[in-house]
Image: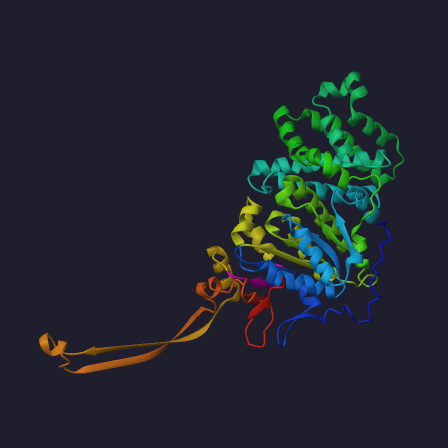
Amino acid sequence: MGWLFKSKQKAAPIGKWDLASPLLQWTDGAPWTIGDACQGTQIFGSTGSGKTTGSLSAICRAFLQAGFGGLFLTAKREDAATYTGYVRDAGRMNDLLVFSPDNQLRYNFVDAELRGDGGAVGLVENLTALLMTVTELGDGKNGGGRDSERYFRLEGTRLARNGLLALVLGRERVTVPDLHRLITSAPASPEHVQSLEWQRGSFCFQCLQAADKASKNESQRADFDLALTYFLNEWPSLSSRTRSVVQSTLTSATDLLSRGAARDMLSSPTPNISPAMCYDGAIVIADFPVLVYRDVGQLIQVILKFCWQRAHSRRDVAANPRPTFIVADESHLLVVDADQTFQTTARSTRTAVVYATQSISTYLDAFGSQAEPKVHTLLGNLQTQIYHQQTDIRTIQYTQEVIGRSRQFVMSGNSSRDGDGLASLFGGGESGASSGFSEIYEFELQAGDLNSLAKGGPPHWMTEAIVYQGGRRFPNGRTWLPVQLTQKR
């Protein structure tokens, strides 16, 4: 495979990828279009509810049949085989690229950012954002919590930014292992700065020297002066405890990226895959399932997702109209703060993001500190939401609130019989009855409606779900629609 990937599919007819083109029909008269898909989709469903074999499968197959390019992320060992089956059924095996240690595809995300943006300053800011996004995985996504945590994160960002600038200005090729070496060899005290022994043995000092000698424009010179002041004055003057915490904030990620599979797959000197291939119809499966590769699998896939998002945000959709997708089952294992930002503009980039997870509670646990606003910001930008059978209380409450209340009429009645003693027991005395109607506003869906949805499986292989789309009225006159989905085996 090379950088000039071309889909084996025939060129699409004009208008094929119009945003109004339907991808699938939830029911008769209820189409789901490319435009709907590009506004983002969230699927919820308890374990065994049929979310993966039902709605997620239907959506993925629709993307492939329509000719989308895209990225499949993986959580379970069997995910790659499942997605490969979808690709095979769509007759698109020639478009399939599997990114794994067992295949020849390699990526260099630093090089990708350099190609995408050009210029040292833009590269530095983008790579800094990427690295700090990756550190969210290492610290339990606690960024933005207590003031002390926020301080260390901001200082970690400064360390990354200044280190990357020195590398970009002073070296022809930049890698994450280079950044790790620079950070760990930075001066630990003002005395180090003056020490000839430190200067001779420090990779940090060598990089600063090379950057100082490199040709620079006025803006680059001003930025480099700040980096020089940072490493020779500010950094060594920090207390040892502060410096240690700030350094570990960043090196927890750079150390992982400098070793083994992460280094080989993401910092390759000969990369042969890029997000742009998806504009020509490439279908990439990142076969690093999180439940198998753990931290390394998370790291690699979060970087791929982030780089794909950035590349899609940059592309000219007039020149590259083919829609693309990013699909993540068990999405709570791979979400980070940056996903919220990308999702606000996903429609204009023609990127259909689909996340599937068990419940709101899994997201709250994944996002850690200040999770509530982060989760609801993300969900607020995923306009199609699909609810399979559910027992999580927070998800049921969320679903009820999203769908809302409606005016409902309740009938009431009572009867009475006058008298006492034996007369009352044997039907004596006078009787009376009353009835009436009252108007209330009540949730349109009750908990029983959600936890009783069919989970599918044998013998009928049919799962049920509730489909909601913001701002849409379905043929039933509501913003939500009950659907039945065939589980393809």
Q: Is residue 136 visible?
A: no
**Residue 22 shown left or right of residue 445 in the figure:** right
Q: Quadrant of residue 55?
A: bottom right
Q: In the figure, 310 relative to 159: above or below?
A: below
Give the image location of residue 41, x and y in percent.
63, 61
Q: Report the coloring of the rendering.
A: rainbow
Residue furthest out toward the left: 422
Q: Which residues are magenta?
A: 381-389
* Along the line of sight, the residue nearer the viewer: 312 or 117: 312
Residue plotted at (80% across, 33% down): 225
- Quadrant in which residue 131 is drawn: top right
Residue at position x 59%, y 73% from top? 473
Toward the front, the furthest residue is 459
Please check the rendered image and state whether residue 387 is part of the magenta-colored stretch, yes or no.
yes
**Residue 188's spot in the image, x, y percent?**
70, 23
* Residue 62 x %, y %: 69, 65
Percent x, y of residue 167: 81, 34
164 vs 72, nearest the viewer: 72
For this orientation, the residue located farthest to the right is 215
How many marks are shown on the rendered structure? Answer: 0
Q: Does residue 41 appear to the left or right of 320 in the view shown?
A: left
Q: Is residue 296 among the parts visible in the rendering?
A: yes
Whether the magenta-drawn stretch holds residue 193 is answered as no
Residue 296 left/right relative to 198: left
Which quadrant of the figure has residue 278?
bottom right
The answer to whether residue 257 is above or below residue 331 is above
88 over 200 or under it: above or below: below
Work out whether residue 461 or residue 439 is closer to the camera in this orientation and state it.
461
Which quarter of the figure is the C terminus placed in?
Answer: bottom right
Residue at x-position 77% and y-position 44%: 109
